[in-house]
């Protein structure tokens, strides 16, 4: 039995899905969506708020403010409600409706930036708004997930050791990159570990996080329109970039096997499966991190009209969602072909 008195005290850190039956290749998917914030961001939010509490940055009457595409906003909403702080989340139109409603239900205020910055992304415009708010009233406290070391330290302390405990023979770790907090925390931990682990960053096509031209990105959480200040590429062994349509296909493939995940998980799984197919991976132990679950994406990634409007009619390859390029050779009694 687990008994808790604050929501951030519960986080399922030991659940993995073996994707071999689903994709035909061995990959252990670490599920980070089973907590009261519904995502991996609960860890970063907890670490950053507790450090600010300890350092006296947060005081009675403080108002937290943060730029978030959604999940950190929900996590901060949970923690702010639990600790009695007010919270303003600055987001943009890519934030899902469900995520926005969730933050409001938890008592937070949500401000949606509708005008992109000069580069065409929203991040710069969101940060400008946060800075203006902080300049207007000294009760506002911006933890700044993009630069706060607590963001990567959370994963150095929790996510990476949890993986190391379960997979002492780990060879490859696939991590999606947004702020790169998860990536840098895990990469730093495994650089210091007793055996080498190849850390592969997964980014979206159109993200400029690791260089490359900017482009339209509709899947929140992963990718960046500026270079992430936390990123130190010397810790990253390889970067792979995934097209959003491939991420969507991976999401639907997982859903057709009963696993409903968010878009960034589709991105990481698609990238990882491509990498495993290109490399000689017999006997390789590979883990990927799934940052959240799929319910918040029902009106986007899992909605046919949205998909067609954004990606065109062929995004789900002719509507046959049951079989796709991912399907493993059918084993007797294992899959049913429709
Ligand atoms: C759904 C989702 N995927 C991936 C990430 C990327 O994590 P990080 O910011 O640690 O790079 C986030 C972070 O917000 C997220 O919400």
Image (cartoon, rainbow, N blue to C red):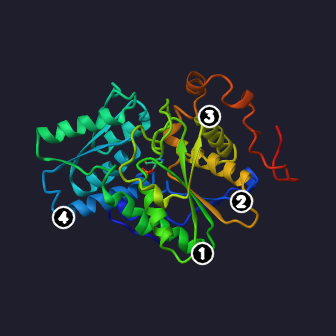
Answer whether residue 328 is visible to the viewer in this image: yes
Q: Residue at the spot x=13%, y=40% of the render?
A: 135
**Which disc is residue 245 wearing?**
3
Q: Say above or below: 209 vs 12.
A: above
Q: Which residue is mark 2?
A: 26
Picture coordinates of residue 235, whole percent (x, y): 48, 61
Please tell me which of labels 4 and 2 falls first in the chain.
2
Residue at x-position 60% and y-position 37%: 243
Q: Which mark is first along the chain, 2 or 1?
A: 2
Q: Residue furthest right?
A: 332
Q: Residues within 10 Å of mark 1 (few under 14, many from 20)?
A: few
On the picture, is 204 further left or further right than 278? left
The residue that mark 4 highlights is 55
Residue at (48, 38) in percent of width and height: 207
On the image, which quarter does residue 260 sit in? top right
For residue 126, the mark is none
Dot 2: what SS? loop
Q: Pick whichever, 46 or 145, lies toward us.
A: 145
Disc 3 residue crowd, few under 14, some 14–19, many 20+, Cα 10 Å: some
Residue occupying the point 69% across, 25% down? 314
Gap between marks 1 and 2, in whole Å? Answer: 16 Å
Whether label 4 touches label 3, CB < 8 Å:
no
Could you tell me how far apart the alpha carbons at marks 3 and 2 are, in whole angstroms?
23 Å
Query: Does the CB distance between marks 4 and 1 fall below 8 Å?
Result: no
Q: Which residue is mark 1?
A: 168
Q: Quadrant of residue 55?
A: bottom left
From the viewer's perspective, is 286 left or right of 193? right
- Relative to 317, residue 44 above or below: below
On-image quarter of the C terminus: top right
Q: CA distance from mark 3 to mark 1?
A: 34 Å
């Amino acid at each position: 039995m687990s008994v808790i008195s604050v929501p951030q005290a519960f986080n399922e850190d030991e659940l993995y899905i073996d994707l071999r039956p689903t994709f035909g290749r061995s990959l252990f998917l670490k599920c980070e969506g089973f907590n009261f914030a519904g995502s991996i961001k609960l860890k970063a939010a907890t670490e950053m708020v507790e450090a600010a509490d300890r350092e006296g940055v947060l005081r009675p009457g403080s108002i937290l403010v943060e730029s978030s595409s959604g999940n950190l906003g929900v996590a901060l909403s949970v923690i702010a409600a639990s600790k009695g702080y007010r919270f303003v989340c600055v987001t943009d139109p890519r934030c899902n409706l469900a995520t926005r409603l969730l933050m409001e239900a938890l008592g937070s205020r949500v401000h949606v930036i509708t005008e992109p910055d000069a580069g065409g992304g929203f991040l710069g415009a969101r940060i400008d708004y946060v800075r203006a708010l902080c300049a207007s009233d000294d009760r506002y406290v911006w933890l700044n997930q993009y630069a706060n070391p607590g963001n990567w330290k959370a994963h150095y302390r929790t996510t990476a050791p949890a993986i190391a405990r379960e997979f002492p023979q780990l060879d490859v770790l696939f991590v999606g990159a947004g702020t790169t907090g998860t990536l840098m925390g895990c990469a730093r931990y495994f650089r210091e570990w007793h055996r080498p682990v190849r850390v592969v960053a997964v980014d979206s096509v159109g993200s400029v996080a690791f260089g490359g031209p900017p482009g339209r990105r509709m899947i929140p959480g992963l990718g960046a329109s500026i270079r992430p200040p936390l990123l130190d590429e010397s810790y990253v062994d390889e970067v792979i970039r995934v097209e959003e349509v491939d991420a969507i296909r991976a999401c639907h493939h997982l859903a057709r096997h009963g696993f409903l995940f968010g878009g960034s998980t589709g991105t990481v799984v698609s990238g990882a499966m491509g990498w495993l197919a290109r490399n000689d991976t017999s006997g390789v132990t590979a883990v990927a991190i799934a940052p959240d679950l799929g319910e918040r994406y029902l009106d986007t990634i899992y909605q046919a009209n949205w998909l067609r409007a954004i990606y065109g009619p062929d995004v789900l390859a002719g509507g046959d969602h049951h079989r796709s390029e991912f399907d493993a050779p059918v084993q007797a009694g294992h899959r049913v072909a429709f």
